[in-house]
Amino acid sequence: MQQRKQLTFAFMDPPFESERTVSFFRLLDAALDKNADVCVFAYEGAAALAFAKQAQHGNAVHGHDLQQEDHPLTKTWIKALQDKASFKGLRFEWVNCGLCVDERGVNESIDDCQRGGPSDFWTFAENAFNSLTIGTR
Amino acid sequence: MSDYVFLQSQDPFTETQTLAQYQLIHNLATKDNRVTLYLIQNGVMPARRGALCKPFDLLCNQNINVVADRFSLAQRGIELDQLKSGINAEEIGVVIDAMLRGDKVIWN
């Protein structure tokens, strides 16, 4: 039986700002498709990706109410990845930089997202088969 | 010799540092490394036939595997038959395959 490999990702972009966020989540989803264990360190603005108080909204310009707009939320994407990993029996760990969430007032994360610091990224990377860091610029 | 995969999200028409990134990729390939250039987001823009960017075309004519992200192409309405010769389209899973092989994967 092939041994599972751990991949580590570090990400810095806040939600709802950059196309990199979509690419990042696509990479995480693809990693689970390939049966990799996934560890994420969310640094700087990315610490808000798992913020539990994110809320959908309507869009008057589109003429859509809340349900019609169905605005995507990153916290929902993280939960979907957690569920996918759980279903496949894979590890999916998400650690937010504690200092970063404090700065932004986004300490209330969805379940199973941890509070940590850069040393967690070091540990994730040290134990990973491979790592990818996606910086802002 | 090493295996490199560059996720190229920046395009040369709006980001001047892209040319320095292309130069690094060119240099690594000339030093006998195996290099894949995975074009993603606006990084796919110079891949269109008719897009004028000599430094990008130089990479395409080198021993570099140039691949475009299908999703990014579709978002921008770029059809596969509009790509420059030698550029293939792939799903993003090929990047994960490279990571699981142990390639050095770098985000630009």
Image (cartoon, coloured by chain):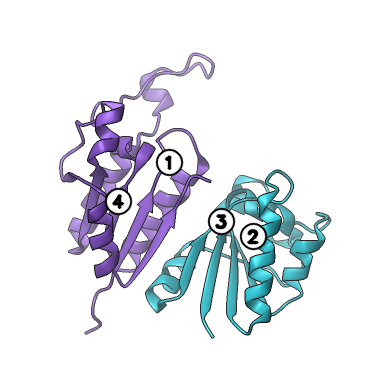
Chain colours: A purple, B cyan
Name the residue carrying label 2: B21
Q: Chain of mark 3?
A: B
Name the residue carrying label 1: A13
Q: In the image, what residue type sits under mark 4?
A: Phe
Q: Chain of mark 1?
A: A
Q: Residue at x 56, y 56 (%)?
A: B108
Check the picture and name the quadrant holding the N terminus of chain B: bottom right
The span from disc 4 to disc 1 (Cα, nearest Å) is 12 Å
Is B61 on the left or on the right of A44, as rendered?
right
Q: Residue at x 23, y 56 (%)?
A: A92
Name the residue carrying label 3: B108
Q: Chain of mark 2?
A: B
Label 1, secondary structure: give it: loop
Q: Chain of mark 4?
A: A
Q: Are marks 2 and 1 in contact (CB under 8 Å)?
A: no
Q: Are marks 3 and 2 in contact (CB under 8 Å)?
A: yes
Q: Mark 1: few, some, or many residues within 10 Å (few <14, many ≥20)? A: many
Name the residue carrying label 4: A41
The span from disc 2 to disc 1 (Cα, nearest Å) is 21 Å
Q: Mark 4: few, some, or many residues within 10 Å (few <14, many ≥20)? A: many
Position of residue B49 measured from the top left corner of the image (x, y, whole percent): 80, 59
Is B14 on the left or on the right of A48, as rendered?
right
Q: In the image, what residue type sits under mark 3?
A: Asn
Q: Are marks 4 and 2 in contact (CB under 8 Å)?
A: no
Q: Is residue A51 visible?
A: no
Q: Residue at x 61, y 50 (%)?
A: B74
In the rendered structure, which disc, 4 or 1, sits on the residue that comes first in sequence? 1
Position of residue A75 measured from the top left corner of the image (x, y, whole percent): 29, 37
The span from disc 3 to disc 1 (Cα, nearest Å) is 14 Å
Labels 4, 3: one chain: no
Q: In the image, what residue type sits under mark 1?
A: Asp
- Out of A40 and B21, give the one closest to the viewer: B21
